[in-house]
Structure formats: structure tokens, C-alpha cells
Amino acid sequence: MKNTFIAQNPSVLWFLLTLGLFTIGVTALSEVTGVGLISTSFVKVLGKMLCLCLIAIAMDVVWGYCGILSLGHFAFFGIGGYAVGMWLMYARTEGIVLESLSTQVIPPTPQEISDAIGNQIFGVVGSSDFPMIWSFADSLFLQLLMVVLIPGLLALVFGWLAFRSRVTGVYLSILTQAMTLALSLYLFQNDSGLRGNNGLSGLQNIPGFEATSQATLSIAFFLASSLALAAGYVFFAWVVSGKMGSVVKGIRDNEARVRFLGYHVESYKLFIFTITAIVSGIAGALYYPQAGIINPGEVAPIASIYLAVWVAIGGRGRLYGAVIGAALVSLLSSWFTGGGAPNINLGFYTVNWTDWWLVLLGFSFVAVTLFFPKGIGGLFDYLVRKPQ
């Protein structure tokens, strides 16, 4: 029994139990059940929080366990959001166009329908032609496939080029950040094919479910996000346990020694980098229909830096630490920037938390780094394992 997966990873059972109770509680208290103690908007906040927890786990695996400080993983998150957002925007616009053209005496041709859809989507950037990257936007299955394939292929190619050259440490972090910056700058251009700075909007309106209330849709996405987080936690707990986990953690602690022992370090690093990118894309695909909009600012390098801060605050090298950090910071961010935190009048100056939230987050990161290097998860370990 000592060699079973659960025995080696007791946190998995506790995490699943906690997540299950949390999911049941939120569902029972939502507006859909009739209780209405939790508003639809807050259900969306909690659903987005679960998606951020999922990408935080992926970041913890690649950084906390494998030692690769990637400052570009939020780019994969954004790519997943853009991939599913393209279908959402196309299908919704197609429905609107078909309804408006249905009153014409002469039925419109497929080309006229396509032109009308293109004008509706790309008119904001002065175009009406569908770029090549929208070739599969009319197929939900293919776009969902892109959610997995594009982040995976991008991470595979980037990782293969970087790891085979044995780029490590701060240089690798700079390269991942440069990749993210290049992607965001490209997306900001109007001719990128993704509406430039306008991004994709109205993603909360799910085609085919126009008669379904946002309250019901928010719970559906919340449950899907909870299921994805549970599956992601179990999967990554399996990845970082056993022989593979030992090799991955060995690469983090002493890469040269692991290579000397005969392990192909580059293959392990490439696997971790690629699989965490794919999971990040899935998290983004679940996040943005709840957010309702995605724009290039979402994949800017600063977003990946925030992700690293969440993991550091929660405690890297602990999957539950990443969840704690992402959940805590995302909820506090919503509270401080959403007007929930009351401003403080000092007489000579009024502290507006909307402006000061990032400063507070920065101080928190510095404090955790200096005084609690193992993060909140490390404090939890200390309390649990403290000698009696």
C-alpha cells in the first residue's frame, strides 16, 4: 500500500476533497439553484480563478519542479483563448448574419454570407476578408484541436531549439520572455488577422445557447473549470512522482549530474515544457468564454511575470502551493481592483486600491521572497509537520 499513487501523494486526495466541496458549495449557492447567495458575476470570477489555478500548476511543474523559469507560459494561455474565441465569434456572427439576410426575397449566396460575416468581424480594422488563420473557424472540433496543437507545437519547436543548444538559467527566461513579447506585438497589429488591439469580444455568448441564461452558462463553465483543475492536478501529481519526478527534480537541482548519470536531460525538459504549454492552452480556452473578451494585452510579458509571482507566493515545488497562490492573488486582485476594498483617506492623501494594488502585490512578493522563501505552502508544511 505504501507504493500506491495516493500513498505517495496524499495531497491529491485532500485537494480533490476540498475542490469537490468547494464546487458543490458554489453550485448550491448560485442563482441557478434558486438560492442566489452567490451572484452570476461572482460565479464567473470563481470559474476564472479555477482556470488560473490550472495554469499556475503548469507553471509550478515547469519552474518549481523542473527548474525552468518560463516567462512566456501565459502566451500559451492566450493562444488557447484566441483559438476557441475565433469559433465563438464566427459562429455567433454567422447566426446574426443569417437572421438578417433571411428576409431577402433572393436567398444570399455562400460568398455573400461569407463577405457579410467577414465585414461584421473585421470591419473594425477596416477589412472584410478572412485571413488564412480563420480557415477552420467554422468548425468547433478543429478549433478545439487548435487549442491543444498550437501551444504544443510552439512549445515543442521553441523548446527543442533552446534545450538542444543547452540554454539555461536567466538566458532561457529572457528567451521565453522575448517569445511572448514578439507574439503580443504581432497580435497588436491590425493585419494580424485577430482584430489587433480590439481583440475578440462577446465570447460569453455561446452559439446555440442563446436562450440559456448567463447564470446557467456561468455554472456550466465553472463546473468544467473545476473538472479540468481536478484532472490537471492528478495528472501533474503523477508526472512529478515516481522515477520521472525524481529525474525532473534532479534536473532542477543539478542538471549536470543527471546528464552524467546517463539521462537525456533535453528530452525530459522538452516533455515538461510542451505538456505544461498544452495544459496552459486548455486553461485559456476555458477562461476567456467566462471573461467575455481577449486582447493582445492578455499575452503581454507582464502577465507571465504575474504568473511566476503567484507561484512564488503560494510556494513553488508544491502543486497545492501554486493553487493557493493563484487563488489568493486572483481573488484579492478582483476585490482590490473591482472596487470592493474601501479607499483609505489619510487626510493628505487618499489611497485608491485600484491604483495601489500592483504595489501591494510587489511588496507581498518581496516579503515572501525574503521571509518565507517556501511561500504559503511552506508555512502549511511547517504547521502540519511541526514536532509535537
Image: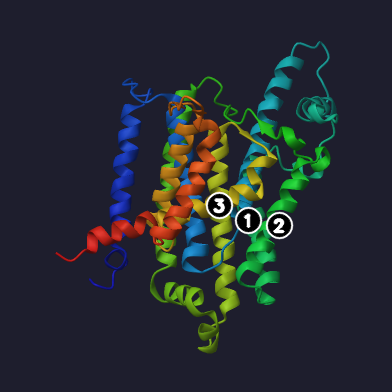
Q: Which residue is mark 2?
A: 179
- Cα separation between marks 2 and 3: 16 Å
Indicate the amino acid at tag 1.
Gly
Q: Earlier in the sequence, mark 1 or mark 2?
A: 1
Instruction: Residue type at mark 3: give it.
Output: Ser
Q: Could you say where residue 80 lies in the image, as x and y percent from the top left?
A: 61, 46
Element marked by disc 2: helix
Category of crowding for the residue at label 1, using alpha-carbon neighbours closer than 10 angstroms: few (below 14), some (14–19), many (at least 20): many
Q: Residue at x 30, y 68 (%)?
A: 8
Q: Is residue 149 left or right of residue 323?
A: right
User: Three-letter amino acid code at disc 2?
Assistant: Met
Give the labeled residue for mark 3: 280
Q: Residue 237 location, x and y as percent?
A: 40, 62
Which disc number belongs to residue 72? 1
Q: CA distance from mark 3 to mark 1?
A: 11 Å
Front residue of 281/143: it is 281
